[in-house]
Amino acid sequence: MRRWAAPAVAVLIASVSAVMSPASAQAGAPDPVRALKQQFRNEHGVRISETTRYFFGKKSKVSGNGTRISGRLQFAPSGPVAADFTWWDLSSPKGKGLPSKKSAPYRVIRVGKDVYDSANWYPGPVPDGKKWVRLPNKHRGRMNRDMARHASLQPINMYDSSMMKAVLKRSASKPVSGGFLYRGTMSYKELSRVSKSTLVAWTSGRPINEKSKGKVSWQLWADRDGLPKRLITTDTAGGGKEPLVKRSDTRYTDWGCHLVITAPPAHEVIDEADLLEYARMQNTPIPPDAGNT
């Protein structure tokens, strides 16, 4: 019995360690950061489908409202460089198993730093033939700016290698059918430290910093090569018994597809400043009668 006791204990300890070890340390697990970087090639991209819902406490009558996004993201060696997607608002679910009422869809195209919103969202008059409005980033609204970056409202930027490394480091992983599942949680304070860009709170529009209270929990499914297939996050802002919560569920398909996103034809585009001037001219009061009628 004694001869077998030590090996048996050693095997048991090794098995427990393998289950509890961080995702980055698991033998045989692919590296999602490396897998993502390999996708950063000219004229390649990925298709995205996402649902985000907001919960403002159990007593809120608007709890569960959200946004649906469907589109494509184009890469270059530097990362995402263009996006073409459609989004629409979702009302609260009316009952278990019942779909939400869907609003009118809005299409957005981003090429580099230029973002074009479909003109059908604009409530005022639009010149004939103008189908797109190009707005300065500061005038696009916080949510619309966030979507335009990656065709997503996820708090975790998978295309930021430093953030993804931190996410994986703080994840527990396990093999699942078709790949691996990574689970973890990170505070706003930690997120602000590991992100290359400034993170903005979805509740206030202000930058997240060391004093911000909140956390993000995630479940990330990746295939056998490490490429993300699905990301579910719960972004909890503040504290208390009924904090503000944003839940995002994103699916990624067709990694590496050939993709070239171009700006709309110039003759179909109007800049915001020109559109405002056009609207002002359309509403200019009729001058007083000069006595010649």
Image (tube, rainbow, N blue to C red):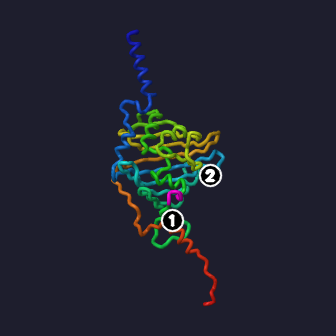
In the rendered view, tell whether residue 142 sits above or below residue 274.
Answer: above
Circles 2 and 1, Cβ within 8 Å, touching? The answer is no
User: What amino acid is labelled 1 in the image?
Assistant: Glu
Residue at the spot of label 2: 62
Give, as a single range, the part of the protein colored magenta: 136-140
Image location of residue 167, percent across then percent down: 46, 38
Residue sitting at the far right:
59
Residue at the (48%, 42%) spot, across then down: 195
Image location of residue 209, percent across then percent down: 56, 42
Residue at the spot of label 1: 272
The quarter of the image holding the N terminus is: top left
In the image, 17 versus 213, the foreground residue is: 213
Image location of residue 117, percent across then percent down: 48, 61
In the rendered view, tell whether residue 34 sits above or below residue 80.
Answer: above
Which tag, 2 or 1, sits closer to the chain's start?
Answer: 2
Q: What separation in Å lies between label 2 and label 1 (alpha carbons)?
A: 32 Å
Residue at the (46%, 57%) spot, across then down: 86
Does the magenta run of residues contain 138? yes
User: What amino acid is labelled 2 in the image?
Assistant: Val
Does the magenta run of residues contain 245? no
Q: Which mark is residue 29?
A: none
